[in-house]
Amino acid sequence: MSQSGNKFINSMSLINLLPQKIQEELSHNSLLKVISGLSNFETQSVKKISEAAFIGGADLLDIACKPELVESAIEISSLPICVSSVLPKSFINSVKAGASLIEIGNYDSFYEKGITFSEEKVLDLTKETKDILPNVPLSVTVPHTIPIDKQVDLAMKLVLEGADIIQTEGGKSSNPYNSGIQGLLEKSVPTLAATLAIHKEFDKHSIHIPIMSASGLSEVTCPLAISCGASAVGVGSVVNKLDDLISMIAVVRGLKESLKNSLIKEKIS
């Protein structure tokens, strides 16, 4: 890939259409996204997660792709909203309702049903989405179910197809053998490995597309994701599986604080 080709790819990025705060957090490698779940269509649940994300200091909210949910989240929080789906046409009305970012991904609910996504399927979904909404910033998740070298290849192809953010995953498939900190580290390994591998390939070709490390991350491992080359982290179950708002807020604050602390340490070193 030529240097001029890289410049073309970077100049085509729609990151500059995202809210200024999102752009700043991405540039500082400190963006925190809270995920309510692709299959979570319960309005009250999404509202509670939205409130916790907002009060806790998250930067972006990722919800299921439904206009009514977008409107409900906007009522509760001023956070920019990302909607996730694997049905490109479903993005249209959610963008009209106020979503700032669209995302192909959050495949976990499909894995539970035995459904996986091939490299070809993800590329087809990306092409279809870009055809429908060419001027809306797009994040695409690279499935952890394909070998890591293929994940890297797919990430490169997705950039060429116009993806503005590449998201990694893997926590759902990881079954830690230990509890405590060691278990948290074990759970994060798949998404951290994918993040590092993709980052190295991007760096080799001078491609400056943000990588969001998601799935299986915690307060302990979010800073590791940044060290592996992520500009952002996405967290779901550590927040959305909690029962009460106070606990959710506390976890979000802890996650954001861990990112801030890693940024400070990086500056000092």
Image: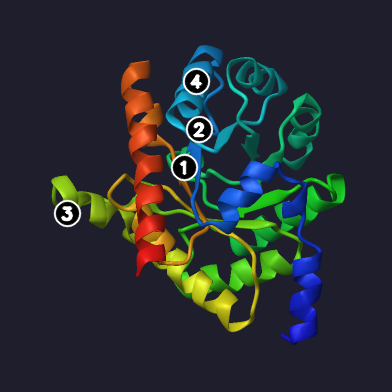
Where is mark 4, residue-wise?
51
Q: Nearer the viewer, mark 3 or mark 2?
A: 3
Which of the two labelled residues, at mark 3 and mark 4, occupies the earlier sequence position?
Answer: 4
Q: Give residue 182's mark.
A: 3
> Which residue is pictured at 68% across the width and 25% down the height?
66
Q: Give residue 132's mark.
A: none
Q: Are marks 1 and 2 in contact (CB under 8 Å)?
A: yes
Q: Is residue 217 at least partly visible in the picture? A: no
Where is mark 2, residue-wise?
37
Which of the two labelled residues, at mark 1 and mark 2, occupies the earlier sequence position?
Answer: 2
User: Along the line of sight, which residue is nearer the eye, 188 or 31?
Assistant: 31
Q: Amino acid at mark 1?
A: Asp
Where is mark 1, residue-wise?
108
Q: Is residue 176 above or below residue 49?
A: below
Residue 244 image position (x, y, % from top left): 34, 16
**Which element carries disc 2, helix, strand or loop?**
loop
How far, Cα to Cα, is label 4 from label 2?
A: 15 Å
Disc 4: CA contacts within 10 A as few (<14), some (14-19) or many (>=20): many
Q: Amino acid at mark 2?
A: Gly
**Which element carries disc 3, helix, strand or loop?**
helix
Q: Nearer the viewer, mark 1 or mark 2?
A: 2
> Which residue is pictured at 52% across the width and 51% down the height?
116
Q: Is residue 193 above or below residue 241?
A: below
> Which residue is pictured at 63% across the width and 45% down the height?
22
How far, Cα to Cα, is label 1 from label 3?
A: 23 Å
* Left or right side of 178 for 154: right
